Amino acid sequence: MLPFTVELRTGASVYEQLVYAVQRAIVSNQLSPGDRFPSVRTLSQELRINPNTAQKVVTRLVDQGLLVVQPGVGTLVAQLPESSQKERSELLLREVEQLVVEARRLSLTFDQVVEAVQSHWIRLSEMQPTHEREQVAAEEAVSE
């Protein structure tokens, strides 16, 4: 059993879908720093994918700093370094542009896009453990 959820869709890259699923699991705290990450063999067997694809996924996540490999221990979810709000925002530039382009292609209004983003934000926040939701709420209250 994998410690995160992934629903592979036909027509999309298995590699990209799996990388995204792990990134999502980390930001939603389904996977926490120090958690053991499944081996390449486990990933390939559980998802019925080519072991080379599973290895590429792990390699990319290690390169992104989301996973660390510790000899004798295995692959673990990394402790993410502290970064400034500007640095974190810059990481989203490409995705935000893609969202805006796609929303305009679909003739969505700004309010409809904000509502959709807010809905997903809330849904992902509900996946966090209770103590982390309280911490996020406290941090948001302080920043207002």
Image: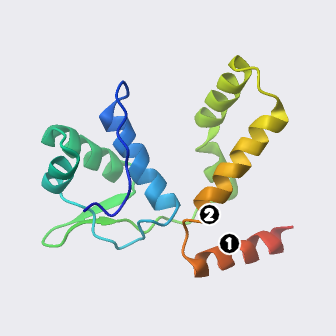
Mark 1 packing: few (<14 Cα in 10 Å), some, or many (20+)?
A: some
Q: CA distance from mark 2 to mark 1?
A: 9 Å
Position above or below: 144 against 17: below
Residue matched to label 1: 136
Estimate the x, y position of residue 114 in percent, counting from the top left: 77, 42
Task: Look at 65% across and 31% down and name the residue there.
Answer: 99
Task: Answer with the quarter of the image where residue 70 lies.
Answer: bottom left
Q: Secondary structure at mark 1?
A: helix
| Farthest-out residue, bottom | 131
As drawn, is 23 to the left or to the right of 135?
left
The mark tally for this picture is: 2
Estimate the x, y position of residue 138 in percent, counting from the top left: 75, 77
Residue matched to label 2: 125
Estimate the x, y position of residue 31 in percent, counting from the top left: 41, 66
| Farthest-out residue, top | 105
Task: Give amino acid for label 1.
Answer: Val
Q: Secondary structure at mark 2?
A: helix
Mark 2 packing: few (<14 Cα in 10 Å), some, or many (20+)?
A: some
Position above or below: 96 against 81: above
Estimate the x, y position of residue 14 in percent, counting from the top left: 31, 35
Task: Look at 54% across and 65% down and name the residue there.
Answer: 127
Q: Quadrant of the N terminus?
A: bottom left
**CB contact under 8 Å: marks 2 and 1:** yes
Task: Single out the mark in the foreground, 2 or 1.
Answer: 2
Task: Give amino acid for label 2.
Answer: Ser
